[in-house]
Image (cartoon, grey):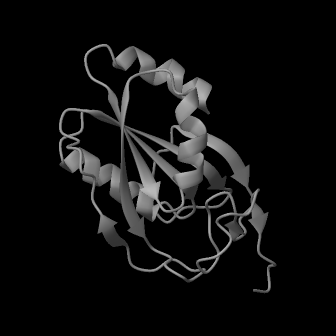
Amino acid sequence: MAVAINRDLEPLTPHRPVLLLSVLNGAIVVTGQILPHLHFPLLLDSVQVSRYGSEVAGGVLQWRLHPRESVRGTVVLLLDDILDEGVTLKALQEYCLREGAAAVHTAVMVRKQRSRSVDVRVDYVALDVPDRFVFGYGLDARGLGRNAPGIFALPEDV
């Protein structure tokens, strides 16, 4: 994923760094892993929105943290843990554009192979997984499991 991001975004940074917005809490692990592999100037900031809380089904989008850095006029790279239904990523894209971002690129660690409830564009994907509830490597299940050393699926009857 980093190779593709470097190829596409490095040419855009001669005058201004990319603003990487890590979507907390889930993207914290993938953010830490990918940062050393991005070879262009960037500012790191975060947003925190959630539809899951301690549940395994998505609910209403809750904004908990807006970026400290202004997105106005910047090229933004949104880095999220998972693309499930697409609601969160679509809301973040719209937020950045509404706030005046010059461009918004999206990257997700995991993309579920399923139909989406919204039309959302994803530019970079590290891993496609079946439509199961997954946890580990930053993803949680009912608030737990983020520190699991890989990506695992809950049993289907949970």
**Percent position of residue 151, x then y:** 75, 59
Q: Residue furthest bottom?
A: 158
73 relative to 135 in the view: left or right: left
Counting from the top left corner in percent of width and height, residue 35 is at 53, 35
Q: Quadrant of the C terminus?
A: bottom right
Residue 1 visible to an observer of this rendering: yes
Q: Quadrant of residue 54?
A: bottom right
Pinpoint residue 75: horizontal percent, then vertical percent. Answer: 31, 32
Q: Quadrant of the N terminus?
A: top right
Q: Which residue is at 23% across, 42% downward?
A: 71
The reply, left or right, for residue 40 in relation to residue 62 is right
Q: Nearer the viewer, residue 99 or 114?
A: 99
Q: Is residue 16 left or right of residue 44?
A: left
* 55 on left or right of 88: right
Q: Nearer the viewer, residue 85 or 11?
A: 11
Q: How many marks?
A: 0
Task: Look at the image and tell me whether residue 119 can be seen.
Answer: no
Q: Residue at x 31, y 69 (%)?
A: 63
Q: Residue 128, how many percent across, how many down?
A: 70, 49
Would you identify the image quadrant in which residue 143 lies? bottom right
Who's the residue at 57% across and 80% down the image?
A: 57
The residue located at (45%, 51%) in the rendering is: 120
Asked which quadrant contains residue 118, the reply is bottom left
